[in-house]
């Protein structure tokens, strides 16, 4: 039995580059009156989403970037949730709900399992919904190539379609038809740069264990989850500023050759002649940059770029980026 004493939890999932962080940043900056604790999980040795989310506000965000949330770190998820609950009861932190943003390579199934098979978690938390963000521009290819995105769509209680402005109406209808075949029970809506009614995401009481057991009868019994071993990540760091022209030329060349295998790349950059951070993001052949916050007094400007992809030549990327420094 779930009661009003339970803390509602939203699992925010979606394949690499689908727009999860953009949506989450909007949730955190909107004046909706909710106090939210966020648990961040990124694939690879180090992530940048925490810095992207904290460009404009000072929420406390718990990062988990030592693996995929649905595999090796699920014990960490239990520990963090228990610790948050303990601190809330002690009056050390104030929050009413939790959002877990998973890595783009996560199967949401084992994350959802946590709220049913761990007694302490089940006593304190209510799994409100699994929200899956789908990149309309790249989804058809991703659905062909990745079982992770198929699992994310299948487990969704609500599907949010991003980047619909980048495809025509026929392509959008074809995608919706395919998503409907995978998951006929999840309502779909379109989002533009994370703009969606907060009521579409929070307190929707969408998770239905019986429906999930119909999809996966072993849902409460299995821990197995495999990743595409061709996918890996690496990080480029430097305390020297980039030359903007050199960097743009190099990255443009990279995406021409390796774009299809560059699943996700993002970073916070230090550019020559600028007193502000540059927030850089890309998916396959699409990349862009925005001006971020000013570098703070006493803060040492630096570059951190994360690349996630299939069999990317790390040495070539690292040496090329090194040559783009001013």
Image (cartoon, rainbow, N blue to C red):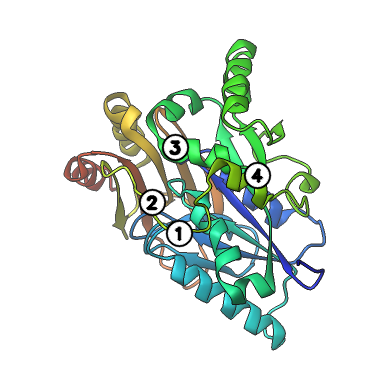
Q: Earlier in the sequence, mark 1 or mark 4?
A: 1
- The x, y position of residue 226, in whole percent, is 34, 48
Residue 68 lies in quadrant: bottom left
Q: Residue at x 58, y 59 (%)?
A: 100
Q: State whether residue 276 appears in this view.
A: no
List the residue tagged with mark 3.
282
Front tag of 3 and 2: 2
Residue 23 vs 299, above or below: the answer is: above
Q: Residue at x 44, y 41 (%)?
A: 148
Q: Which mark is residue 258?
A: none
User: Which element type, helix, strand or loop, lies under badge 1?
Assistant: loop
List the residue tagged with mark 4.
211
Q: Earlier in the sequence, mark 3 or mark 1?
A: 1
Question: Which residue is most to the bottom?
Answer: 90
Front tag of 2 and 1: 2
Q: Residues within 10 Å of mark 1 (few under 14, many from 20)?
A: many
Q: Residues within 10 Å of mark 2 (few under 14, many from 20)?
A: few
Q: Earlier in the sequence, mark 2 or mark 1?
A: 1
Q: Are marks 2 and 4 in contact (CB under 8 Å)?
A: no
Residue 164 vs 133, above or below: the answer is: above
Q: Earlier in the sequence, mark 3 or mark 4?
A: 4
């Amino acid at each position: 039995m779930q009661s009003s004493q339970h803390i509602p939890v939203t699992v925010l999932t979606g394949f690499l580059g689908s727009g999860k962080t953009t949506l989450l940043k909007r949730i955190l900056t909107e004046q909706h009156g909710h106090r939210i604790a966020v648990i961040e999980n990124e694939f690879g040795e180090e992530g940048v989403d925490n810095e992207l989310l904290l460009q404009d506000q000072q929420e406390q965000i718990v990062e988990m970037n030592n693996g995929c949330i649905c595999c090796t770190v699920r014990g960490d998820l239990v520990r963090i949730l228990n610790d948050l609950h303990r601190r809330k009861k002690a009056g050390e932190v104030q929050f009413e709900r939790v959002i877990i943003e998973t890595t783009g390579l996560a199967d949401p199934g084992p994350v959802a399992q946590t709220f049913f098979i761990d007694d302490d978690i089940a006593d304190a938390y209510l799994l409100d919904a699994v929200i899956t963000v789908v990149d309309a521009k790249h989804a058809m290819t991703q659905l062909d190539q990745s079982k992770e995105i198929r699992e994310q769509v299948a487990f969704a209680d609500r599907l949010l379609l991003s980047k619909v402005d980048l495809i025509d109406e026929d392509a959008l209808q074809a995608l919706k038809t395919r998503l409907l075949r995978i998951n006929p029970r999840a309502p779909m809506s379109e989002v533009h740069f994370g703009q969606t009614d907060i009521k579409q995401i929070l307190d929707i009481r969408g998770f239905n264990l019986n429906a999930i057991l119909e999809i996966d009868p072993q849902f409460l019994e299995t821990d197995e989850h495999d990743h595409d071993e061709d996918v890996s990540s690496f990080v480029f760091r430097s305390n020297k500023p980039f030359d903007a022209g050199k960097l743009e030329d190099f990255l443009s060349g990279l995406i021409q050759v390796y774009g299809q295998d560059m699943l996700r790349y993002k970073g916070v950059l230090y550019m020559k002649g600028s007193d502000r951070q540059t927030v850089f993001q890309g998916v396959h052949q699409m990349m862009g940059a925005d001006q971020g916050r000013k570098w703070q007094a006493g803060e040492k400007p630096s570059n951190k770029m994360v690349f996630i992809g299939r069999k990317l030549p790390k040495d070539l990327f690292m040496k090329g980026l090194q040559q783009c420094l001013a």
